[in-house]
Image (tube, helix red, strand yellow):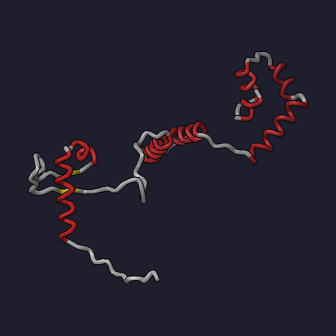
Amino acid sequence: MVMMYMRGMTKAGAARAAGYTESHQWYKFFNSEGVATVIEYLRQKEFSDIRVTRDSITAMLMEAHSKAANTTEEVKAIVELAKLHNVYPAAPKSGGGGTQVNVNLNGGSVDGLEGIEIKNEKQLERMSDAQLAHLAKDMLADAMKEPKLIEGRIVDSD
């Protein structure tokens, strides 16, 4: 009952939720010295040990959605809820985890590669080993046509 009261319920509401039916029962309980001491301790601890949980953030976002003044605010709350609950697929991390390659095949000679534009990794996953080898060979040949000059100097390690 004390925890329900500390989470924002009224004393009467917390008592009803705990199963008390008579007002004098919960009034006596809340006014006892031990309970008053516990409530005061929890109030002090609340400021030094505030816990934000997924449930509390969800409740706040739902409240923000219900109080939204316009559709834009509603959609923003929905997007944040979806992110919080991992509804969207994980975004690739920058700086690691893989390289995005855009491939445009024109005039390939392997089965079914003529004029195909690769737009996502699923297309690459469906290719045969022979098609992937041909694709890699073509990409390497294209890279070799345009050599990149690397400027620098040789440092003697002696």
Q: Position of residue 1 (x, y in %)?
A: 75, 26
> Which of the two residues, 36 or 66, is positioned nearer the viewer here?
36
Side (left or right) of 88 relative to 123: right
Q: Residue at x 16, y 53 (%)?
A: 134
* Res 85 visible: yes
Above or below — where is 24 with respect to 142? above
> Which of the two residues, 110 or 1, is positioned nearer the viewer here?
110
Above or below — where is 12 with respect to 57? above
Q: Position of residue 130 (x, y in %)?
A: 17, 47
Q: Residue furthest top?
A: 21
Badge count: 0
Q: Residue furthest right?
A: 33
Q: Residue at x 14, y 51 (%)?
A: 116
Side (left or right) of 113 relative to 20: left
Q: Quadrant of residue 37?
A: top right
* Res 70 visible: no
Side (left or right) of 139 relative to 43: left
Q: Position of residue 117 (x, y in %)?
A: 18, 52
> Which of the two residues, 32 or 129, is positioned nearer the viewer here?
129
Q: Position of residue 74 (x, y in %)?
A: 46, 43
Q: Residue at x 67, y 43 (%)?
A: 51
Q: Quadrant of residue 38?
A: top right
Above or below — where is 6 with respect to 52? above
